[in-house]
Image (cartoon, helix red, strand yellow):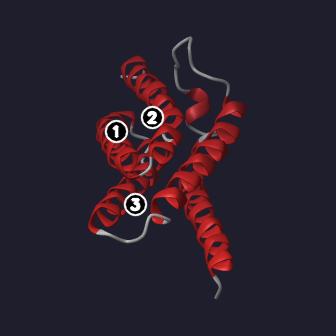
Amino acid sequence: MDVKTNKVVRFIFSIAVCQAAGVIGSIFTMQSIPVWYAFLKKPIFAPPNWLFAPVWVTLFILMGVSLYLVWGKGLNKQVKKGLLIFFMQLFLNILWSFLFFGLRSPLYGFIEIIVLWISILITISKFYKISKNAGLLLLPYIAWVTVASFLNYYIWILNL
């Protein structure tokens, strides 16, 4: 495989693995939206349901590009550590969907989303040191998860 083909394969894989995380998370989400989430009390700032899918698709694309940029720096110790943390936060992203929507637990979801937020912050820090652009591409992700954290918290409180 030539260098150009290898880069294309890495790029496609990077986007696909992040989108796959979104698909896995959506399995838990889609089952609960019409039968559980629709009936929860939500704060006034809750975005409309139709907004979540395009935002997450976009965020997963940005995450994939970020992953590609870091992976493209080689597999030295710093990159390997950054990739490990990236994949941990990706797993935590899926786990949140399972806890909040799959188990229908705003409390477990809230506890976990705090851990997810911290892991995203660590990922941004590690990626920024490897590739500034890779770190910056994750800023919309942490911004959205910040909003999601507040939304999760208020859903938990409003539905006690």
CA gap, disc 3 and disc 2 = 15 Å
Q: Amino acid type of disc 3? A: Phe
Label 1, secondary structure: give it: helix
Q: Position of residue 134 (x, y in %)?
A: 49, 47
Q: Which of the 4 image quarters holds residue 52?
A: top right
Q: Vertically, is 111 above or below 91?
A: above
How packed is label 3: few (under 14 Cα within 10 Å), some, or many (20 or more)? some
How packed is label 1: few (under 14 Cα within 10 Å), some, or many (20 or more)? some
Label 3, secondary structure: give it: helix
* Residue 80 in the figure: left or right of residue 4: left
Toward the viewer: 127 or 95? 127
Q: Vertically, is 11 above or below 103?
A: below
Residue at position x 45%, y 43% from top? Answer: 132
Residue 87 bears which disc, if any? Answer: 3
Q: Are marks 1 and 3 in contact (CB under 8 Å)?
A: no
Q: Position of residue 104 (x, y in %)?
A: 44, 42
Residue at position x 61%, y 40% from top? Answer: 33
Q: Amino acid type of disc 1? A: Leu
Which residue, given by chain and number where applicable, does mark 1 sit on? 121
